[in-house]
Image: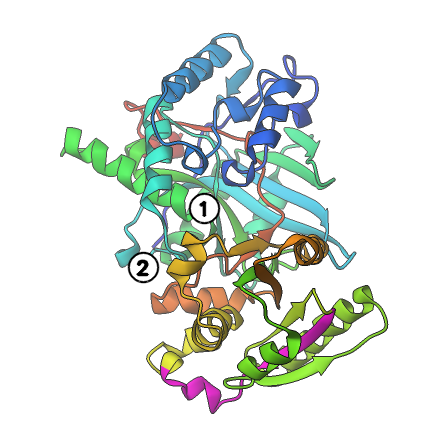
Amino acid sequence: MAAVVPFRGVRYNPEKIDHLEDVITPPYDVISKNAGAAMQKKNPYSMINLDLRNTSQDETDDDGRYEKARQRFVSWQDKGVLLRDAVPSIYLYFIEYTHPSGKKMTRKGLVALVGLAEFAEGIVKPHEKTFSGVISDRLELMEACQAQFSQIFSIFSDPQNRVIAALETHRKEPPVCKVQDHDGNTHTLWQITDTETLREINAFFVDKSVYIADGHHRYTTALDCRRRALANNPQLPADSPYNYIMMYLCPSEDSGLSVLPTHRLVRWPGSMNADDLALKMRAGLHVDEVTADSREDLIAELLRKMDEANTSTSLPAFGVYHAGENRAFVLKSTRAQLEDKILAGKPEVLQKLDVVVLSDVLIKKLLGLSHDQLVKEQLVSYISNTEAALDAAVKASETEKDHTPLLFLLNPTRVGQVLNVADSGEIMPHKSTYFYPKIMTGLLINKLVAHEAVSSLYKG
């Protein structure tokens, strides 16, 4: 079902850019205002000047930034800072990284163009909701620059590892680039141009679906861009570049594919001690207090108990830490509790998600905090790093006077759960998954050239 084809990637010219780490960036939506300013200062050719920060974080009025980004993109190509590969290629993309557990891992994937399909077609499957403000910003940038600056992160099933093995066999040495990101992870990119291999990859995906792991807004933006192109040209050819999106694709079975949890720091309005918190939670969940000598040991034991509960029963389990009193509890669902009227109307694939039970049963029902209240009063923060989440909770407990900080710790969502939710056509709550590490922006750019035909590029 999925159309996966090579393309002529646009890359930084190593003769013009001595240090690639100075110009590549994390995805636009995780760059803070201060971090963005530092990137601009570090090198004028930083990708932050093309793949602009998500301006809906600060302001939404167009101050000419999209046109300025277009002018930079054209200028950088004219100066030879950016070069377009002469031959259509698929790119093998490895990331060597250290998992938060300390384990050294390598995630293996590929970058190619994938044919756009509406979600209802079941070819490209989402698991998250998108927001119009973000899409509007990305659409204006894509239309102005006629380029896709960053890749959608998607996963696909390949139990026999046919795709990556074929690409590894026919990759060109040396790699086209090798660079470390700000976390010390090593990103390596190889070019594959062998015609038979490209056809083999294309044929493999003919009866496959792909699942968006990260980049739902960018994908929806590409769909909107295609709709605009169709409105301007109802006879838009099937092989138009507007019918394709640049994706990073990783096998769901890859041993280096990691999903980290995203913890929630909730500022409960008012004062609530740990005993009252436990009483509220016991009205709908099984609650066990966890004890240890130090704060660090307490959190480590809580995480161990959470993982043990989740593994032994396959039912939702998570933890809560009351920073003000240095007390922690592991919370578990029972099969009977899954029949709670709040969850009874939800599909089974959602009932079994830790994050659904946390948001719908604990936070909404037992603690009485609606999603609208959380957003409107800015009562919740999302933090993936456990140490950072703990530090934020402790600091908040020392400074907050009108709120009680409660840190809700989650187990990672399993890749199989993501696929099951997507296959069922359902949507996970906000910030349910954090695929780590992030793909770096600037290693490859897909230039949209209206008169080019993607199929002819593929056929060579």
Neighbour tally class for label 1: few under 14, some 14-19, many 20 plus, Cα within 10 Å:
many
Q: Which residue of the protein is positioned furthest toward the bottom in this rendering?
A: 336
Q: Quadrant of the C terminus?
A: top left
Point out the stretch of residues depicted in magenta. 326-341
Decide if residue 185 is in sight here.
yes
| Residue 351, picture quadrant | bottom left
Residue 387, percent across and down?
A: 73, 55
| Distance (Cα) linking label 2 and label 1 | 17 Å
Name the spot of residue 274 as percent of width and height, x first. 65, 75
Whether the magenta-drawn stretch holds residue 249 is answered as no
- Neighbor class of circle 2 (other Cα within 10 Å; few <14, some 14-19, many 20+) is some
Report the disc number at residue 122: 2
Count the marks. 2
Query: Considering depth in this image, is 358 or 245 the residue closer to the camera?
Result: 358
* Residue at horizontal 35 percent and vertical 47 percent from the top: 131
Is residue 324 shown left or right of residue 218? right
- Residue at the spot of label 1: 215
**SS class, disc 1:** loop
Which residue of the protein is positioned furthest toward the top in this rendering?
Answer: 79
Q: Position of residue 455 (x, y in %)?
A: 33, 35
Q: Residue at x 36, y 77 (%)?
A: 347
Seen in the image, is 185 located left or right of residue 89? Answer: right
Q: Is residue 74 above or below residue 438?
A: above
Q: Earlier in the sequence, mark 2 or mark 1?
A: 2
Residue that protrudes farthest toward the left in the picture: 234
Q: Is residue 327 magenta?
A: yes
Name the quadrant containing residue 219. top left
Location of residue 269 with respect to 357 vertically, above or below: above
The kind of residue on which mark 2 rests is Gly
Residue type at numbered disc 1: Gly
